[in-house]
Amino acid sequence: MLRYVDERVATVWVQADTSCEVEILGAREPTWCVEGLHFALVELDELTLGADHPYEVRLDGELVWPEQGSAFPASTIRLLDPHARHEVAFGSCRTSLPHEPPYALRAAEHPTPRGRAHTRRQRGRARGHQVR
């Protein structure tokens, strides 16, 4: 998920289900762990102002985003032009389930569209939203 962007740098937030190295546009960061969840903040500081930067996410060298065979256009990052008009849209990636404490599920506890929990073999799936 694109966490921050200005006219010179962008930061991408990644959550993975195991310890790994995250790579985006040649920048690499190891994950860090909080309560068994693995995160990385990848700072991209060699982007060109005014250009679209299509990107992929790799975990330990394995391509995890975009998903193979995706019909969607490439995810891109564009730095903010300090002289242009800016429009802001925001949302939340907070899940609406479960409705009782602790109000959050571990990765393996989330139901899939078929109603069964994710398994460890799905390691390497990056979570977040596509940024275009």
Image (cartoon, grey):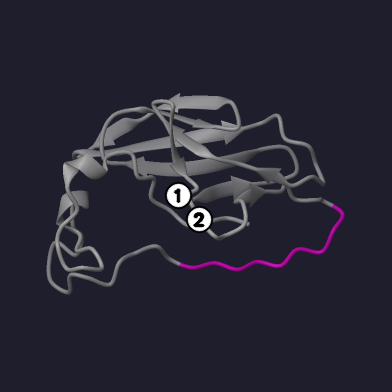
The answer to if 96 sits in the magenta stretch is no
- The answer to if 90 sits in the magenta stretch is yes
Instruction: Look at mark 2 in the image and give the residue it sits on.
Output: 70
Dots 2, 1 in contact, CB < 8 A: yes
Give neighbour class at mark 1: few <14, some 14-19, many 20+ (Cα, 10 Å). few
Residue at 61%, 51% in the rendered image:
74
Considering the numbered disc 2 on the image, is that residue within a helix, a strand or a loop?
loop
Nearest to the observer: residue 61 or residue 28: 61
The amino acid type found where label 2 is placed reads Ser
Residue shown at 25%/44% (left/top)? 122
Which image quarter holds the C terminus? Answer: bottom right
Direction from residue 47 to residue 40 in the image, left or right: left
- What segment is highlighted magenta in the picture? 83-91
Q: Main secondary structure of the magenta part?
A: loop
Front residue (pair 128, 11):
128
- Residue extending farthest front: 69
Q: Residues within 10 Å of mark 2 (few under 14, many from 20)?
A: few
Q: In the image, residue 22 lies at what x, y percent? A: 44, 31
Residue 87 pos. (x, y %): 71, 67
Residue 67 — which label? 1
Three-letter amino acid code at the position of disc 1? Glu
Q: Residue furthest right?
A: 83
- Can you tell which quarter of the image residue 95 is in? bottom left
Using the rendered view, name the quadrant where residue 18 is placed: top left
Q: Which type of secondary structure does the marked residue at label 1 adopt?
A: loop
Looking at the image, which is closer to me, 132 or 38? 132
Q: Position of residue 39 (x, y in %)?
A: 35, 38
